[in-house]
Amino acid sequence: LHAGQYQFVESVFDLNEVFYSVYDKLINKRNLKSNSVHCNLSMPVTHEFLIFSDPKAFKYIINNLFENALKYTEKGEIKIGYRINEKKADVSLTGKKFKVCSEDFDFELEIFVKDSGLGIDKSEQKFIFDFFRNVEKSKIKLYRGTGLGLAIVDKLAHKLGAKIEIESKVNSGTHIFLRIPLKEFV
C-alpha cells in the first residue's frame, strides 16, 4: 500500500456482514479477557447495507481498529459499529446500494470504535498513524506491535476518501472514527 502496490478491487458487499464477521472472529479469538471487557456492536441498519467499494479495505480497517481496542482495554467497554450522518433528510437506505464518493454525497457513514482502555496522551496522538511508530513508552512492552496497523488504516481510509479522527485521554479510553461520504449507486 505504501509503495502504491495495493489495487482497490471494488464490488458490492454488505457492511453489516463485514462487521459481524470481524466481531465474531475477534471475540472468539480473544475470549473477552475473562469477561472483564464488555463489547457492543452497534449498527442502525438491521437489513443488509450494500456498499460498492473495496470490501477488503473496509474489513482491514474495522478489524485493525477493533483489535487495537481489545489489545489496549483490560476492563470496561468497547463499542464498535457505524452510524449514518444524513446530509439530505429524505435519504432512504432500504433496498439500495451506495458507493463511496467525494462530492455531492447523500450522507456520511461514520465507522467508530470506542473503548475505555489505556488512552493516548494528546502529545502522542499525532504519531499513531505514522509507519513503525508505537506511542507506548514503558520499558516493558506489554502490548507488542509493528507500528504498521494504524498507518495502513490511515492510508486505506484516505484512499476511500474518508476522514479519520481520534479523541483520547490517558486512562479514559480512545474513540476513533472514520467519516466516509456515500451516494446512492444505481
Image (spheres, rainbow, N blue to C red):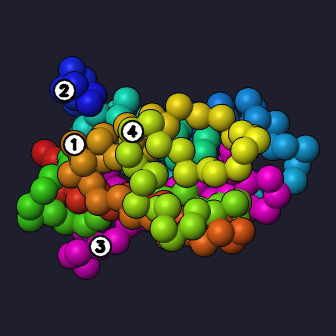
Mark 1: amino acid: Lys
Label 2 secondary element: loop
Mark 4 vs mark 3: give the one in front. 4
Circle 4 residues within 10 Å: few <14, some 14–19, many ≥20: some
Q: List the residue tagged with mark 2.
A: 4
Earlier residue among tags 2 and 3 = 2
| Label 4: element kind | loop
Which residue bears the numbered disc 4?
Answer: 131
The magenta segment is: 69-98
What's under tag 2, amino acid-wise? Gly
Q: Residue at x 25, y 66 (%)?
A: 107
Is disc 1 surrounded by few (<14), some (14 to 19) or many (20+) residues within 10 Å?
few
Residue that numbered label 3 is attached to: 86
Task: Using the image, determine if residue 181 lies above or below residue 26.
Answer: below
Q: Which mark is residue 159?
A: 1
Q: CA distance from mark 2 to mark 3?
A: 33 Å
| Residue placed most toward the observer, 114 or 122 | 122
Closer to the eye: label 2 or 1: 2
Distance from Cα at disc 4 to Cα at disc 3: 33 Å
Q: Position of residue 119 (x, y in %)?
A: 63, 63
Q: Earlier in the sequence, mark 4 or mark 3?
A: 3
